[in-house]
Image: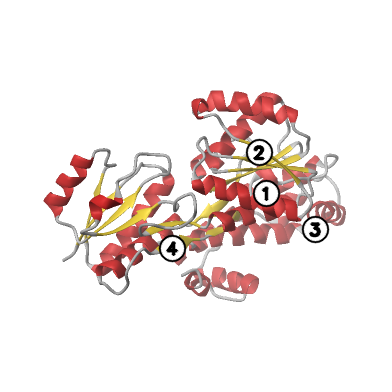
Amino acid sequence: MKTVLYVKHSEKYSDRRKLAGVSEYARAQGWNLQAVEKVERTEHLTELLRFWKPSGIIVNQSAGTSRIPPSLLVDVSTVFFHYPAEDGVPRENCVFNDAKGTAAIAARELLTLNLGQYAFVGWDKPVPWSESRKAEFARIMTLHGKNVSVFAPNPKDQRSDRLAATLKAWLKKIPRPVGVFAANDRIAGAVVSACNLAGLSIPDDVAVIGVDNDEEICEGTHPTLSSVGIDFFAAGQLAAETLDRLMSKRVRGPLFARYPPCRVVRRESTRRFARLDRTVAQAVELIRREACNGLAAREVINLFGCSRRMAEIRFRAALGRSILSEIRNVRLETAKTLLANRTTQLGFIANRCGYRSLAAFSVFFRTETGVTPSGWRNGLR
């Protein structure tokens, strides 16, 4: 039995999902997977290697933190979770997010809002993945003839209250309305806090989108935060698969593999409506909350206090689709998010999306996408 060490970085959502993906692959291959806490000292790593004598190691380490020197691991197959060096050339085996693809998805979301100004708020250190997202976002906006402002947080402002205060001053200076792409959800959450401090309306004055779809952050802000979802579970499986290839000597390094973003999980921070029709905004939020709990179109229509025909006209004028279409769209997006986690049972997903049977859910999903839920999930591989 092969022993594989997994060096953890933190207990954040993204890191937990990566470990879950590695664990599933390890079980399928019959590996003895040992997860160890973040390694800070060279001596600590040397002792772990001597104790476990692993066939392979996966190191989950964040840019900007002290890194394990690859030179210490020349005698054991190793895969790192981190972005390549500043020049983009991998010098060791690594798995990392497609930063350019992530920026492109965020740019498309903000461009659909037809705002006059756009901005990027980076990580609090000039790390490669944040810089790559910034460069690609700026390139796409320039391609569309749009101006981009850039805010680079001061490393001394890592405390959320200090970061929000400096962002508040910056947001008041730049032209509005503005669409802000933040390096990740933690930074995006600080942007939302800054807008609240400054009395700026989200998304009418400032539309905000982050990255990672960390639900604890995204659902905990007010208003809720839109985000580019990343399938960290699949990233963990990709890292394990890459390590497997190295351990079997089928390939020689350095290897690198990108795990792509999924899609935008749209919440209140990028939903713009006509200022004069707040009822439409209330209707959309009701649909977002209750679409998967058996919400019927008539319950939404009741909010308008007018005829069904007039309610549909007002709703379609704001969103370009009917009330029922929006309910089905929310159910579909929820289903896709849940299907991205390959360990979630289809019956659970059907129930979570408001369907009493898997058969009814499958008919709905195939009608909307042209493929079955299982077929769509298999297409993610």
Measure how far apart labels 3 and 1 are at the Cα level. 29 Å
Q: Which of marks 2 and 3 is in front?
A: 2
**In x, y percent, where is residue 103?**
61, 53
- Which of 42 and 365 lies nearest the eye of the viewer? 42
Q: Is mark 4 on a helix, strand or loop?
A: strand
Q: Are marks 2 and 1 in contact (CB under 8 Å)?
A: yes
For residue 355, above or below residue 136: below
207 lies left or right of 43:
right
Q: In which quarter of the image is the N terminus?
A: bottom left
**In x, y percent, where is residue 124?**
52, 35
Q: Are marks 4 and 1 in contact (CB under 8 Å)?
A: no
Q: Residue 91 falls in which quadrant of the image?
A: bottom left
Q: Nearer the viewer, mark 3 or mark 1?
A: 1
- Which of 192 and 373 lies nearest the eye of the viewer? 192
Measure how far apart labels 2 and 1 are at the Cα level. 9 Å
- Which residue corresponds to mark 2? 150
Decide: few, some or many residues near mark 4? Use Cα within 10 Å; few <14, some 14-19, many ≥20: some
Measure how far apart labels 2 and 3 are at the Cα level. 32 Å
- Which residue corresponds to mark 1? 138
- Which of 23 and 53 lies nearest the eye of the viewer? 53
Outermost residue to the left: 51
265 lies left or right of 75:
right
Q: Is mark 1 on a helix, strand or loop?
A: helix
Residue type indicated by callout 1: Ala
As drawn, the label of residue 308 is none
Decide: few, some or many residues near mark 3? Use Cα within 10 Å; few <14, some 14-19, many ≥20: few
Q: Residue 237 falls in which quadrant of the image?
A: bottom left
As drawn, the label of residue 257 is 4
Residue type indicated by callout 3: Gly
For residue 190, above or below residue 34: above
Residue type indicated by callout 2: Val
7 lies left or right of 160:
left
